[in-house]
Image (cartoon, grey):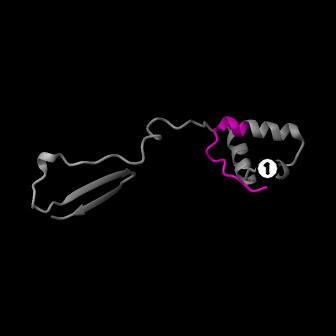
Amino acid sequence: MSKRRHSRYPASQWQAWIDEQSRSGQSQQVFCEQKGLSKSSFQHWKRRLASGTPVTPPTSATRSALFAPVSVPEEDAIEDEPRGWEIELDLGDGVCLRFRRGA
């Protein structure tokens, strides 16, 4: 069976699979093959959930749009005059990207 990516499943789904595998008596290898799971992902989640590491769902801040609309007000536009622009993206941790196009 081909492996599918399950990285977007919530912790509760991984816990259900871990519990199911434990009750089944099957090895992790056989269980993962039957479910189409990556054995390494299964083991990762088993360790993570057993350690009590908090698993927090994405907040609205992390689920925000990947793109933001950008526009220039019409009153700032002057016909027949070349315009430049500047964009600055602060990515955090001291990383800042600056893009400029001169007039």
- Residue ID at (18%, 65%): 102
Locate residue 80, reporting x and y percent. Answer: 9, 61
Q: Main secondary structure of the magenta part?
A: loop
Q: Is residue 57 above or below residue 76?
A: above
Count all numbered tags in the image, as a single digit. Answer: 1
User: Which residues, given as a range, are shown in magenta?
Assistant: 1-15
- Residue ID at (13%, 52%): 77
Q: Is residue 20 above or below residue 92?
A: above
Left of 37 or right of it: where is 55? left
Near mark 1 (Cα within 10 A), the count class, few <14, some 14-19 or many ≥20, is: many
Locate residue 82, reporting x and y percent. Answer: 13, 63
Left of 37 or right of it: where is 9? left
Secondary structure of the residue carrying tag 1 is helix
The quadrant in which residue 50 appears is: top right
What residue is disc 1 on?
Answer: 32
Looking at the image, the residue that sits furthest to the bottom is 102
- Residue ID at (75%, 56%): 2
Instruction: Judge whether residue 13 is colored magenta.
Output: yes
The quadrant in which residue 23 appears is: top right
Q: Amino acid at mark 1?
A: Cys
Which quarter shows the C terminus? bottom left
